[in-house]
Image (cartoon, rainbow, N blue to C red):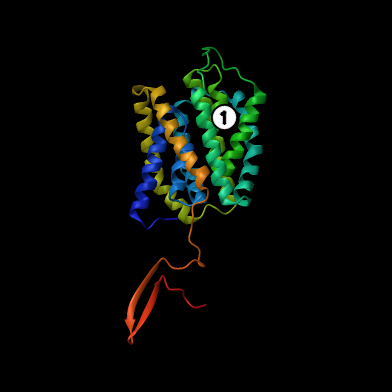
Amino acid sequence: MMFSDPQLWLFVLLAVFCSALIQGIIGFGYAIVAMAVLPLLLNFREANLLVAYSIVLPVIWTFWAYRRHSNLKLLAGAIIGSLVGLPLGLLTFTLIDLDYLVRGTGLVILLIVVDGFFQKAPHVDEGPQKASSVWSTFAGFCSGFLAGSTSIAGPPIVIYAIRQPWTQEQYKGFIFGFFIMISISRAIGLALMGFATLPVLVTTAVIVPFVFLGTKLGLMLGPKINPVLFKRCLLLLLAVSSLYMLIQGKPAVPTEDEPPMVEIIEPGDGQPKIQTFPEKSSP
């Protein structure tokens, strides 16, 4: 997976940096934004693996700042649900056609955008966290399934959490505590399925510092930016990306049976000669 094209490297590093920056500002969105942008130039499964492995350490680091606001009893239901949904998502990742995965991810992102535009801020209760364990488990299951199939674990659990009467610290403590469990579980699951290859891990090691940098900058800029205006701009960008994924589907990739893209005509022995590139090697 180590890219040979410098422009592709620049695109990937810029994409993960901006995705991490957004997550640092609003508390979530790394996987949503990255999986809306990276598949524009990368294979969907390659993008999925990069997002899955590059988010583990930054999530642990971010949670450390909010660890005192995390309630393990509230996390229990969501984590149990995610542990059920994650294996099903991983199975879907390996069996479902790539075109369906791309279009399905686009649909998920579009639904998140629609929900975000009509979402109302709940009344904040400064007291102890209160929540329904049933809905917490269901949200965890949905997030686990999406994490396994598309790397986008955030939407269901974020939609659930943002509707609770929690403070920002309680919200982030819950969200990042959940993300730690699901990101580690997903990374282990992919490794057991043979996806943790050396090229994947080396590429991840290169981009992780940019994820840390983007997250840190986002945490610094967050209090200085109008969150409502920023969220509206982000939703518009995500809407465009999700519509592109829904319409385009799986990126077109040339196959060996397709005719060559380049033909050069050269004179040879007085007769026109057609030379094709790339030349096919004889079996």
Q: Is residue 95 above or below residue 172?
A: below
**Left or right relative to 277: residue 70:** right
Name the residue that disc number 1 marks: 157
> Which residue is rendered at x = 52% and y = 29% of the image?
114
Total count of labels: 1
For the question of whether residue 117 can be seen, the reply is: yes
> Which residue is rendered at x = 50% and y = 26% of the image?
116
> x, y percentage for residue 68?
49, 23
Q: Nearer the viewer, residue 279 or 61?
A: 279
Which element type, helix, strand or loop, lies under badge 1?
Answer: helix
Q: Which residue reaches farthest front?
A: 271
For the question of whether residue 55 can be seen, the reply is: no
Within 10 Å of disc 1 (Cα), the crowding (few <14, some 14-19, many 20+) is many
> x, y percentage for residue 107?
55, 38
> x, y percentage for residue 63?
47, 30
Q: Is residue 95 above or below residue 183?
A: below
> x, y percentage for residue 128?
56, 14
Q: Nearer the viewer, residue 75 or 168?
A: 168
> Which residue is rendered at x = 58% and y = 39% of the image?
146
> Which residue is rendered at x = 40% and y = 73% of the image?
276
Residue type, mark 1 in image: Ile
Q: Quadrant of residue 265?
A: bottom left
Q: Nearer the viewer, residue 124 or 115?
A: 115
Q: Which residue reaches farthest bottom?
A: 269
Name the image quarter holding the N terminus: bottom left
